Image (spheres, rainbow, N blue to C red):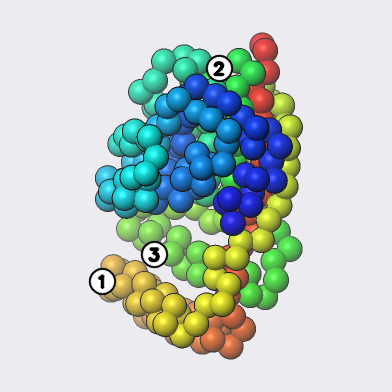
């Protein structure tokens, strides 16, 4: 799906750039698709605040020339105007302070540099996409009970509002359906079941545990009765304006 998003962006597809930065790299899937489909780059850096997820990203990106760093998007260890292209994919809802991250993006992005946001949105979801939203909401609730930074999925307008008045001009905007659950079978559903069981056990000591157990059962039944598709993806491409 990420490959399709990039290949449908004329500016990215023909891009020749020196340095690329991906913030909130996660498992590295988006960065891998990006580097495989832009025209050329000299150096790429991915950063995340979770050491364990960077180990997964390192394996996925082993065939690419990428440096992976443990770094906070709200406090980037880079010089001003260092990067030609900066990307953030499905990480806005994991940031404690999105405005701080955007200020850092603006600081380290070159004038006329490109900034890509790819983010899940909850607008106009189908019933199968709503299953994924409820699944996502469940993980958010459990994380919040443990004091972790994890926020609910945003609307398209909420995402775009972050970038208003930040000297960024919008060049491209598209919405996509993610097909990562396409053809999902019982084996995959059992894998999701296991993830739900493991997650709810993290808060077995809380008073909300019984209610969350009921929610787990409801989610398992819904996946099998209604099905599941990933929530929509919003792709935005900005250019840094001259101040």
Report which residue position mark 3 lands on.
Answer: 142
- Determine whether label 1 and label 2 are within 8 Å by CB: no
> Gap in Å between the C-alphas at discs 3 and 2?
39 Å
Q: Nearer the viewer, residue 86 or 16?
A: 16
Tell me the element at label 1: loop
Q: Position of residue 156 (x, y in %)?
A: 69, 49
Circles 3 and 2: CB atoms closer than 8 Å: no
Q: Determine which residue is flagged by label 1.
A: 205
Query: Can you tell which quarter of the image residue 11 is in?
Result: top right
Please identify the quadrant where the C terminus is shown.
Answer: top right
Among the two numbered marks 1 and 2 on one chain, the one whose residue lies closer to the N terminus: 2
Instruction: Give the answer, above or below, for where 123 lies relative to 24.
Output: below
On the question of residue 103 being in view, the answer is no
Q: Which mark is residue 110?
A: 2
Earlier residue among tags 1 and 3? 3
Q: Residue at x 58, y 88 (%)?
A: 225
Residue in view at x 60 percent, y 15 percent: 111
Mark 2: give few (<14), some (14-19) or many (20+) Cα within 10 Å.
Answer: many
Q: Is residue 228 left or right of residue 22?
A: right
Q: Estimate the x, y position of residue 88 in percent, counting from the top left.
A: 52, 40
Q: Which of the 4 image quadrants contains residue 164?
A: top right
Residue at left offset 38%, top offset 76%: 191
In front: label 1 or label 2: 2
């Amino acid at each position: 799906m990420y490959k399709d998003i990039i290949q449908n962006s004329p500016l990215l597809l023909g891009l020749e750039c020196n340095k690329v930065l991906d913030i909130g790299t996660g498992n590295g899937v988006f960065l891998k698709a990006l580097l495989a489909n832009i025209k050329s780059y000299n150096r790429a850096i991915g950063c995340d605040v979770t050491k364990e997820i960077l180990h997964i990203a390192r394996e996925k990106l082993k065939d690419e020339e990428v440096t992976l760093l443990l770094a906070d998007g709200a406090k980037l260890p880079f010089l001003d105007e260092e990067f030609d292209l900066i990307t953030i994919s499905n990480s806005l809802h994991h940031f404690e302070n999105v405005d701080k991250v955007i200020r850092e993006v603006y600081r380290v992005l070159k004038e006329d540099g490109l900034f890509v946001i790819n983010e899940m949105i909850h607008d106009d979801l189908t019933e199968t996409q709503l299953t994924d939203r409820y699944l996502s909401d469940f993980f958010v609730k459990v994380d919040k009970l443990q004091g972790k930074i994890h926020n609910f999925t945003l609307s398209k307008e909420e995402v775009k509002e972050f970038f208003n008045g930040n000297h960024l001009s919008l060049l491209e905007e598209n919405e996509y359906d993610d097909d990562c659950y396409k053809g999902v079978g019982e084996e995959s559903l059992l894998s999701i079941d296991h993830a739900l069981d493991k997650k709810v056990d993290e808060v077995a000591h809380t008073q909300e545990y019984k209610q969350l157990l009921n929610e787990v059962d409801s989610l398992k039944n819904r996946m099998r009765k209604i099905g599941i598709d990933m929530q929509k993806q919003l792709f935005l491409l900005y250019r840094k304006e001259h101040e």
